[in-house]
Amino acid sequence: MTEGRRRTAGRPATGKSSGGHSQSLVRGLNLLERLAGSPGGLALSEIAEQSELAPSTTHRLLQALQSQGYVTQDNELGVWKIDVKTFRIGNSFLEARDFVGTSRPFLRRLTNQTGETANLGVREGSTAVFLAQSESPQMMRMITRLGSRAPLHASGVGKALMAWLPDDELERILEERGLARVTNNTLHDPVALRESMAQIREQGYACDREEHAVGLHCVAACIHDEHGTPLAAISVSGPVARIPEARLLELGELVRDAASDITAQLGGRVPAPDEIPA
């Protein structure tokens, strides 16, 4: 045997080994996902069935994850659960996420799609505060000064955030701030406002029909965190001449989809229309 052939023969079978390790890694991550979706834990047989793996393979993978601190077994209940190390990794992601930076490409995408200004805002008390903007190229356009505020009940971003607040928080805001009119179109009746909130949750976006500024229409949708609670909201705004009533549905769906994409990138979840996060 030549020296060259000896070297070749002496190499480990990296292709096969790498493939086997990759498959085990994917399977292990799949098990973590299953357990993450079941806070109460899962029995070995349930994990194996959901993952479509043999119980022996499932048990071997769980033991490997357990040795590294990613999962733990509750011997009393006989179930497997997520352990502290997985929790710490999840927390580090939540601490590092930058929803403003994550949202910027989506704001630019919305401006390219619609030709209008796109904004990002958050709730602070009973007001919406605007933090980022993608400006429309149109000569006549909506411009919001970053850091400026708008009442929750009288703005698209504000209503998109307000719609997902717990009932006690909504009542507190109404008691403290009321529903002052900003324009003649501002919702100022609590019953009408609550009906509007239900509609926003159902369709996934809010509409501001000259409620904050005469001659301006806006559609907005909420970005949610991992608990489904409101994290921020994005909007598209422009003059009524370019955003008539007939165009609100089209823009609302675009904004809703963008907000859903941002929510997914941030590790959040969009709650069901009848689910008000605590």
Image (tube, rainbow, N blue to C red):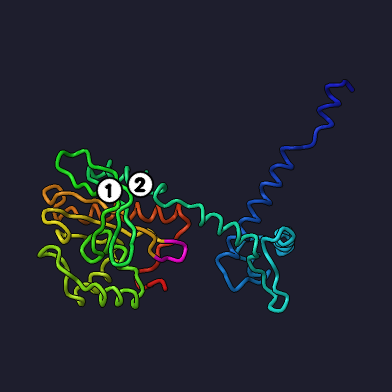
Q: Residue at x 17, y 69 (%)?
A: 180
Q: Mark 1 packing: few (<14 Cα in 10 Å), some, or many (20+)?
A: many
Q: Which amino acid, mark 2?
A: Phe
Give the residue number, with chain letter if any, for mark 2: 106
Whether 122 is among the magenta residues is: no
Q: Is residue 85 left or right of residue 205?
A: right
Give the residue number, with chain letter if any, for mark 1: 118
Is 35 above or below relative to 170? above
Is 122 above or below relative to 126? above
Whether label 1 touches label 2, CB < 8 Å:
yes
Q: Residue at x 31, y 76 (%)?
A: 172
- In the drawing, what numbered circle is on residue 84? none
Q: Residue at x 58, y 60 (%)?
A: 33
Q: Is residue 262 left or right of residue 208?
A: right
Locate residue 138, reporting x and y percent: 18, 39
Q: Is residue 211 left or right of residue 35?
A: left
- Specify start and end residues of the magenta stretch as a single range: 225-229
